[in-house]
Image: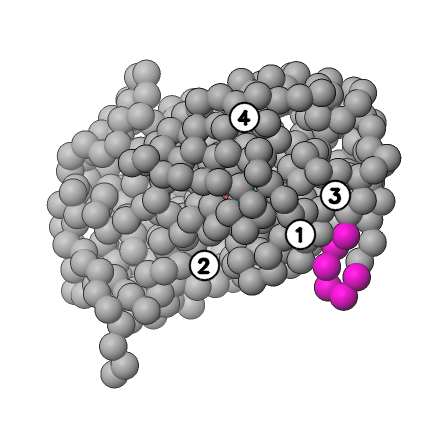
């Protein structure tokens, strides 16, 4: 077990390059099994979730090799349609394998998925979407057994624009006979990125990024070399870290357009932000203003994956901030730790009311989920004194050595082994 030790009060400054997006790479790795020839993904982030996904692919019989940051996936040797239980439970995104396995092998056996404990995260929408494509689904001893022998294109109406369900249906439909239309699809940019990748492999998909996606099934898909889009959540986290310290940073390789909702809120908080092609130039004020109200929503609304980091920022902002989480029902687990650092936060149902204090103080706190862990680091950068964030592994699930990115900008942060005290 590892932890981060942060000495607060150091202003962040400098330039930092944004990695490729975890939430783009994970479904694309699943989609790679649809191709008959090898695919190469460039610049894959070295994070635990990606490494676990690679191990899942290998368990199924795919050959995966790394050359620097590029991953080459050869699915021609895929043998198994049954997902390994232990690994699948560690990774919520293993659920994407359901659509990809069905597309490739017409059969998938998956355990109920794991991932961050941020709400119930059921998979009913995934199952309803696949059923609409003619998949026969049974539950047997905690496993979901999907039989796609009679799969064909169809109309899928999602009750809610679930990111994972949209991606799963896209992958299941890519190689089956007929035309599929997904209505009320999620519009997250990572879905458009998956479309670009699958089309580069010969799929015929249009409309991703809008609420209606059309998929014309193809007989076979070939390999491709592809660079996934940059990570808008990592980019937003770095801006929030700079904002917490009154800093001044420049992001390169940044997903500028996709950061729109986050940039708009940071501007309301008094930050000066200029954007160019793949560049964000950011200057924070001495003290942030409250953003008023922040409501998480499906894209293009404010992302739930930035809620915790934004909440950490509002702790010291001038005035009262109201933060409402509408996407996941249990995503305020970082609040107790922020309070230990001196924050004034009241949570009522899905809304947190934050009264800005002049400063936070260091404390020993616990990363309980990925983005909550990042939020505690941000709070630690702003706080007086030393903060210890236990559970570095949880942050490593989605950020590639975040402490190195931050220390490159002047943060005083180090990783250390957790010893029993
Ligand atoms: C993806 C992202 C995650 C992000 C989330 C919302 C990846 C790997 N993960 O997760 O980082 O926080 O989108 O932007 O891309 N739901 C159901 N039934 C279902 C599916 C979802 O009720 O079958 C609910 C979930 O419990 C949640 C909401 O729908 O409350 C949104 O979930 P969804 O959009 O599916 O998120 P994920 O794909 O799991």
Mark 3 or mark 1: whose residue is earlier in sequence: 1
Crowdedness of circle 3 by 10 Å Cα count: few (<14), some, many (20+)?
Answer: many
Which element type, helix, strand or loop, lies under badge 3? strand
Mark 1 or mark 2: whose residue is earlier in sequence: 1
Q: Is residue 385 above or below residue 301?
A: below
Residue 374 as seen in the image, left or right of residue 405: right
Prevalent SS, magenta region: strand
Residue 200, magenta (yes or no): no
Q: Nearer the viewer, mark 2 or mark 4?
A: 4
Q: Is residue 289 visible?
A: no
Mark 4–mark 3 Cα distance, whole angstroms, equals 20 Å
Q: Nearer the viewer, mark 4 or mark 3?
A: 4
Mark 2–mark 3 Cα distance, whole angstroms, equals 32 Å
Q: Which residue is mark 1?
A: 82
Q: Which residue is mark 2?
A: 369
Residue 233 as seen in the image, left or right of residue 1: right
Q: Nearer the viewer, mark 2 or mark 3?
A: 3
Mark 2 or mark 3: whose residue is earlier in sequence: 3
Q: Which residue is mark 4?
A: 37
Q: Which residue is mark 3?
A: 107
Mark 2 or mark 4: whose residue is earlier in sequence: 4
Q: Nearer the viewer, mark 1 or mark 2?
A: 1
Mark 1–mark 2 Cα distance, whole angstroms, equals 28 Å
Residue 143, magenta (yes or no): yes
Residue 21 as seen in the image, left or right of residue 159: left
Mark 4 or mark 1: whose residue is earlier in sequence: 4
On the image, which quarter does residue 299 sit in? top right
Mark 4–mark 1 Cα distance, whole angstroms, equals 21 Å
Start-end of magenta stretch: 140-145
The residue located at (42%, 68%) in the rendering is: 336
Asked if disc 4 and disc 1 are in contact, CB closer than 8 Å, the reply is no
Percent position (x, y) of residue 274? Answer: 28, 22
């Amino acid at each position: 077990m590892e932890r981060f030790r942060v000495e607060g009060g150091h202003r962040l400054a400098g330039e930092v390059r944004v990695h490729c997006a975890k939430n783009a790479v994970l479904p694309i790795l699943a989609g790679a099994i649809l191709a008959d020839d090898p695919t190469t993904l460039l610049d894959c982030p070295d994070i635990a979730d990606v490494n676990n996904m690679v191990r899942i692919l290998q368990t199924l019989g795919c050959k995966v090799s790394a050359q620097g940051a590029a991953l080459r996936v050869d699915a021609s040797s895929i043998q198994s349609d049954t997902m390994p239980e232990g690994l699948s439970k560690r990774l919520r995104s293993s659920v994407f394998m359901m659509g990809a396995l069905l597309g490739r092998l017409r059969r998938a056996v998956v355990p109920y998925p794991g991932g961050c404990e941020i709400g119930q995260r059921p998979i009913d929408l995934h199952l309803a979407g696949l059923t609409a494509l003619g998949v026969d689904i049974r539950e047997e001893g905690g496993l979901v057994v999907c039989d796609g022998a009679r799969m064909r294109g169809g109309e899928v109406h999602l009750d809610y624009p679930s990111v994972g369900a949209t991606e799963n249906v896209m992958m299941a439909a890519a190689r089956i006979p007929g035309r599929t239309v997904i209505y009320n699809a999620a519009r997250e940019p990572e879905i458009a990125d998956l479309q670009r990748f699958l089309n580069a492999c010969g799929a015929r998909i249009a409309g991703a990024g809008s609420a209606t996606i059309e998929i014309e099934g193809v007989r076979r898909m070939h390999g491709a070399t592809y660079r996934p889009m940059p990570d808008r959540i990592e980019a937003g986290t770095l801006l929030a870290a700079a904002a917490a310290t009154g800093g001044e940073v420049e992001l390169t390789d940044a997903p500028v357009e996709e950061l729109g909702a986050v940039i708009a809120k940071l501007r309301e908080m008094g930050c000066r932000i200029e954007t160019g092609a793949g560049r964000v130039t950011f200057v924070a004020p001495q003290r942030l203003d409250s953003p008023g109200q922040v409501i998480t929503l499906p894209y293009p609304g404010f992302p739930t994956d930035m809620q915790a980091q934004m909440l950490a920022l509002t702790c010291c902002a001038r005035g009262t901030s109201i933060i409402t989480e509408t996407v996941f029902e249990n995503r305020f687990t970082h609040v107790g730790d922020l309070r230990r650092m001196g924050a004034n936060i009241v949570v009522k149902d899905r809304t947190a009311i934050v009264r800005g204090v002049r400063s936070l103080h260091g404390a020993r706190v616990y990363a309980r989920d990925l983005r909550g862990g990042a939020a505690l680091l941000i709070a630690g950068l702003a706080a007086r004194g030393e903060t210890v964030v236990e559970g570095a592994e949880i942050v490593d699930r989605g950020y590639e050595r975040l402490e190195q990115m931050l220390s490159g900008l002047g943060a005083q942060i180090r990783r250390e082994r957790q010893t029993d005290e």
